[in-house]
């Protein structure tokens, strides 16, 4: 770890001001991603601005939507709520230690290709609420560790419409439990969306699966559908081709759960 | 030898003496010593897998404020052995991560920054990264002076040694066979995966006396190795073994200690050095990647007529792959007339391998036990029946020479056949795989001193670092021998100046050999107590018995006296000759060989290639289980490590010889949620050479799981996958290519 200035503001404005004043600042939530990155010296920010003093935690149900505060822990989402597929997803993140520190805001802001929440954001058509306005799921994830978050903006909460039915299936990395591939299939007000994480540089929707399921919501509808894996991640854990194959398998299993 | 039903303490399961300290985080491990004025050392490691070092210049680091010492090869004697060259590179760096220099500074951060100021000039060479590359014609040489088996009349080679064991005539045996099966197998390089990284603190006093505190399996070996590498006398060095957070063979050689001592000498400060996980992976000993071929022939009734094995092992950058033990183990479970075994010790530009639990046996036995499984299939025989038909037994000549005394292989096989987990049908959709395990175990040298306190309680000092609950076992054996309760005894792992010489904790020798020394030292105490009682009672010592922790007159001796306990004798020892201490030392022979039988039921997800282990059962002959819970723990731990190695663990290298998964987020050891309950059954065929019948139990448990897992996958899929690990992508590829 390199030296940095540590701040723990108690308000949103103070946090953003600190960020604006910093030469190279970074927000800290659960630290489950950021701290290992700092320890490995993959980042050398001048200022670390700890968000844990902000009142951004909690789960609220209103108008058929669940709004989850950015600092809500994975373990709190996993404890159960109106979207059972989302709590199941949270329960499968990492291990108990990670779930007791990691936050939904941190996970989504980070856009790790193997993170689980982004699949739910895509499949449920969530809205990302930030200090610089709300961002639609389809616009949020832009690439490997890249999002539409304005520089210096803070993710404050995520709003998930409660789906009619939804299921998440992931193939976990045998070591970290990050998703080698994770697929969430959801039907919300008649709209079918398939969110995929792990496979590509960032979460995306598998549109041809969505169309096939809209015509015929069944496992068989997905048989033989192509997954274009040309741009998928290829690493020591899995080739792009293997990931492409898993997208189909995980999607079929998710559909099987809810048919 | 005491019969099981006579034992009062042995076989019970008390809490281990070091347990509470460990679970509450108070125990002091290698990195936990803080000394006044202590500074911190860091190692500069090679960025290349193979390169000639043209120069090393540490002056830039030394010029930095807060940097108090820096060392490189020129600070160590030029004449050195492989270990010395591994601790600090000399002419060449031989693997990525090889230590080139080290610095000590006031903070760990500063020490790390100072590494950047060291200038090393390299001539980069082509790395040799596999056995195939190493033994190919015209291969680059890892060591230009290396000749196979030291035969300088032959050209230099990457094959450091070839070992051969032969008996009878294998060709003739195959000709007599009705069925012959063979296979070729690859097992990847794997790390022991101990949780505690290597760590030490070294300090020197004004008289030049060196003290090293470190996490090790053998502090006497640390003393010998450190003295040799520094060119000093062992009398100048005292080594204290800290608590140890796992070793599995990986903490038998020094890596940091000589560097820390040298840095301490130059800075005149205590120096602490702690590896991070990445360094542990890149620069400490894993076990060999192997390429093995196995072949067996048998009659229709299952009688094996011949077997051959060709075992080639990567040694890493220096000779010394555990191929010898591989050769000893590969056919040990079988009584054979005709066999030939050949083993190759092959140099590659990877870290020098270290022992890993039954070093060399899992890889070789994986190959042979897979082929034996295929043979059972060909013959339509139950795999346990086939093994029973050919099993080694008391009197069988082991492939490596001696005749086995009483051994428990047949007892384990019979127990397996009768076990409810084996008689139960294979669950729907699963495959079942069986394999035998073996480790010869060793004896070697141990010492023990037993001291009596003034209140009659007991202290054991011995020299075996406790990696598996051995202090509890020492206390149990002492309690049994002395006839006193377990909780009146404390056992200590004493430093190199506070107990007699002791070999390392390795080869599953501690409970056997150090245990033997402890029992004999307790017998010494008993003999002395009888004399003290005799003196008190004014009778002859041979008229006194030791019964249930007390001196009593022998039956028929005419003495109207009360029995004397240890406490009674201690109370008056001022009048009978002073304090009492017992001692014994042994060079223990006859470590009984340990055999096991394991099987597992598992399912393969044909859509993803993922293996789901549903059930695992391990049966092992422990001779006698001193503390059964710790024997079961060894069996479960070995199964867990073996399953990890079979299914997911491997070193992944890029083309430049740089490990790509040097951390637990990418190097995939199994965790509790990956494993089923591992059922255990201890078989007890006492080892006649140990006073309580002990055999080593620590290593045998990892020798069967690789093959049991492979055989279960074979059973589940209907075809064999011969390369480990059977990771999901590899299995899916195999399934796809099989299905066309
Ligand atoms: C061993 C291990 C296993 C894991 N396994 C999984 C897994 O299986 N699945 C999975 O999905 N994840 C996994 N993770 C990641 C974990 O879920 C992290 O918690 C998550 O990725 C980041 O959340 P955090 O709160 O820790 O964020 P931090 O590490 O604090 O921050 C991450 C990044 O997001 C930024 N950030 C944080 N909060 C905000 C905010 N409110 N607004 C704007 N920017 C913000 C930070 O500046 C930083 O760049 C694992 C992590 C570990 C260490």
Image: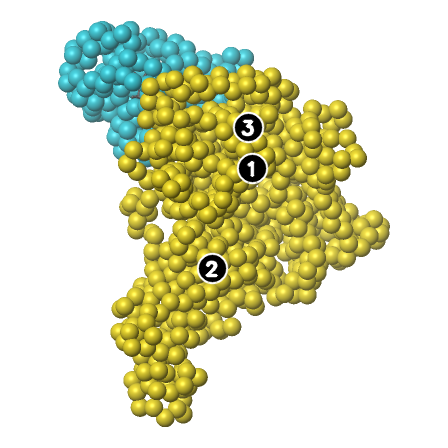
Chain colours: A cyan, B yellow
User: Do marks 3 and 2 share a subunit?
Assistant: yes
First along the sequence among labels 1 and 3: 1
Task: Judge whether B320 appears above or below B582 on screen.
Answer: above
Query: Crowding near pointer 1: few (<14 within 10 Å), some, many (20+)?
Result: some
First along the sequence among labels 2 and 1: 1
Q: Residue at horizontal 64%, vertical 37%?
A: B319
> What distance separates the C-alpha of mark 1 from that of mark 3?
10 Å
Total count of labels? 3
- Return the residue at label 1: B83
Q: Quadrant of ligand 1?
A: top left
Toward which corner of the image does residue B109 lie, by quadrant?
top left
- Return the residue at label 2: B447
Give the structural element (helix, strand or loop) at label 3.
loop
- Return the residue at label 3: B89
Task: Judge whether B500 appears above or below B523 on screen.
Answer: above
Q: Where is residue B27 in the image (x, y as percent from the top left)?
A: 32, 46
């Amino acid at each position: 770890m390199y030296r940095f200035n540590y701040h723990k503001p108690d308000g949103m404005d103070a946090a953003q001001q600190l960020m604006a004043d910093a030469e190279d600042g970074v927000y800290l939530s659960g630290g489950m991603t950021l701290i290992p990155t700092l320890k490995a010296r993959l980042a050398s920010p001048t200022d670390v601005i700890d968000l844990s003093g902000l009142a951004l935690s909690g789960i609220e149900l209103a108008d058929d939507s669940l709004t989850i505060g950015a600092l809500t822990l994975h373990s709190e989402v996993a404890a159960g709520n109106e979207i059972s597929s989302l709590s199941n997803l949270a329960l499968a993140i990492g291990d108990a230690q990670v779930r007791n520190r990691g936050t939904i805001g941190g996970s989504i802001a980070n856009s790790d290709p193997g993170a689980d929440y982004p699949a739910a954001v895509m499949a449920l058509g969530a809205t990302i609420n930030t200090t610089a306005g709300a961002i639609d799921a389809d616009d949020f994830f832009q690439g490997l560790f890249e999002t539409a978050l304005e520089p210096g903006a803070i993710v404050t909460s995520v709003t998930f419409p409660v789906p009619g039915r939804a299921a998440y299936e992931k193939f976990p990395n045998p070591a970290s439990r990050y998703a080698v591939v994770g697929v969430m299939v959801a039907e919300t007000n008649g709209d079918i969306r398939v969110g995929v994480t792990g496979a590509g540089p960032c979460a995306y929707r598998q549109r041809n699966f969505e169309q096939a399921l809209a015509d015929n919501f069944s496992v068989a509808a997905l048989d033989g559908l192509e997954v274009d894996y040309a741009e998928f991640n290829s690493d020591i854990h899995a080739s792009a081709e293997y990931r492409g194959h898993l997208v189909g398998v995980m999607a079929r299993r998710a559909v099987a759960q809810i048919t | 030898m005491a019969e099981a039903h006579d034992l009062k303490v042995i076989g019970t399961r008390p809490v281990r003496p070091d347990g509470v300290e460990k679970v509450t985080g108070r125990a002091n491990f290698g990195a936990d010593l803080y000394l006044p004025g202590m500074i911190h050392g860091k190692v500069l490691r090679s960025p290349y897998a193979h390169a000639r070092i043209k120069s090393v210049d540490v002056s830039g680091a030394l010029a930095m404020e807060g940097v108090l010492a820096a060392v490189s090869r020129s600070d160590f004697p030029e004449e050195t052995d492989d270990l010395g060259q591994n601790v600090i590179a000399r002419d060449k760096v031989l693997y990525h991560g090889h230590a080139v220099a080290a610095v000590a500074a006031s903070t760990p951060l500063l020490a790390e920054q100072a590494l950047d100021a060291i200038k090393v000039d390299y001539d980069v060479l082509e790395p040799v990264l596999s056995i195939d590359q190493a033994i190919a014609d015209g291969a680059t040489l890892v060591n230009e002076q290396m000749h196979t088996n030291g035969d300088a009349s032959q050209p230099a080679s990457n094959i450091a040694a070839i070992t051969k064991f032969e008996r009878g005539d294998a060709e003739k045996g195959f000709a007599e066979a009705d069925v012959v099966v063979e296979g070729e197998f690859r097992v990847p390089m794997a790390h022991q995966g101990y949780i505690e990284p290597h760590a030490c603190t070294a300090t020197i006093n004004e008289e030049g006396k060196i003290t090293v505190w470190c996490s090790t399996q053998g502090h006497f070996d640390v003393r010998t190795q450190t003295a040799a590498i520094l060119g000093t006398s062992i009398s100048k060095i005292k080594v204290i073994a800290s608590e140890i957070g796992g070793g599995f063979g990986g903490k038998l050689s020094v890596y940091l200690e000589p560097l820390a001592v040298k840095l301490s000498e130059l800075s005149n400060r205590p120096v602490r050095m702690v590896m991070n996980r990445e360094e542990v992976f890149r620069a400490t000993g894993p076990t060999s990647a192997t390429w093995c071929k196995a072949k067996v022939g048998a009659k229709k009734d299952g009688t094996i007529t011949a077997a051959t094995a060709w075992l080639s092992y990567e040694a890493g950058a220096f000779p010394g792959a555990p191929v010898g033990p591989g050769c000893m183990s590969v056919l040990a479970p079988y009584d054979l007339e005709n066999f030939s075994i050949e083993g190759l010790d092959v140099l590659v530009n990877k870290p020098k391998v270290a022992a890993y639990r039954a070093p060399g046996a899992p890889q070789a036995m994986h190959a042979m036990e897979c082929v034996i499984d295929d043979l059972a299939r060909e013959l339509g025989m139950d795999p346990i029946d086939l093994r029973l038909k050919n099993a080694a037994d008391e009197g069988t000549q082991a492939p490596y020479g001696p005749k086995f005394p009483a051994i428990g292989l047949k007892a384990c096989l019979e127990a397996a056949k009768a076990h409810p987990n084996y008689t139960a049908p294979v669950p729907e959709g699963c495959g079942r795989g069986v394999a035998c395990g073996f480790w010869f175990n060793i004896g070697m040298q141990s010492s023990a001193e037993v001291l009596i306190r003034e209140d009659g309680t007991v202290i054991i000092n011995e020299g075996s670092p406790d990696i598996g609950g051995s202090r509890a076992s020492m206390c149990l054996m002492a309690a049994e021998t002395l006839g006193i309760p377990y909780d009146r005894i404390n056992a200590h792992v004493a430093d190199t100046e506070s107990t007699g010489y002791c070999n390392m904790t390795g080869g599953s020798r501690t409970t056997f050999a150090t245990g033997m020394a402890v029992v004999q030292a307790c017998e010494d105490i008993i003999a002395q107590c009888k004399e003290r009682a005799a003196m008190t009672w004014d009778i002859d010592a041979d008229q006194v018995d030791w019964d249930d922790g007390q001196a009593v007159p022998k039956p028929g001796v005419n003495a109207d006296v009360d029995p004397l306990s240890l406490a009674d004798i201690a109370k008056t020892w001022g009048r009978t000759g002073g304090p009492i201490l017992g001692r014994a030392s042994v060079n223990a022979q006859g470590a009984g060989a340990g055999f096991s039988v394991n099987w597992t039921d598992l399912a393969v997800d044909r859509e993803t290639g993922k293996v789901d282990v549903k059930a695992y059962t391990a049966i092992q002959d422990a001779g006698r289980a001193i503390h059964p819970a710790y024997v079961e723990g060894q069996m479960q731990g070995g199964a867990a490590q073996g399953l990890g190695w079979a299914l997911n663990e491997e070193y992944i290298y890029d083309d430049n010889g740089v490990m790509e998964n040097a951390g637990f987020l990418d190097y995939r050891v199994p965790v509790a949620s990956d494993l089923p309950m591992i059922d255990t059954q201890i078989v007890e065929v006492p080892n006649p050479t140990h006073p309580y019948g002990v055999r080593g139990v620590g290593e045998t448990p990892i020798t069967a799981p690789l093959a049991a897992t492979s055989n279960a996958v074979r059973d589940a899929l209907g075809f064999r996958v011969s390369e480990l690990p059977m990771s999901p992508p590899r299995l899916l590829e195999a399934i796809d290519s099989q299905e066309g």
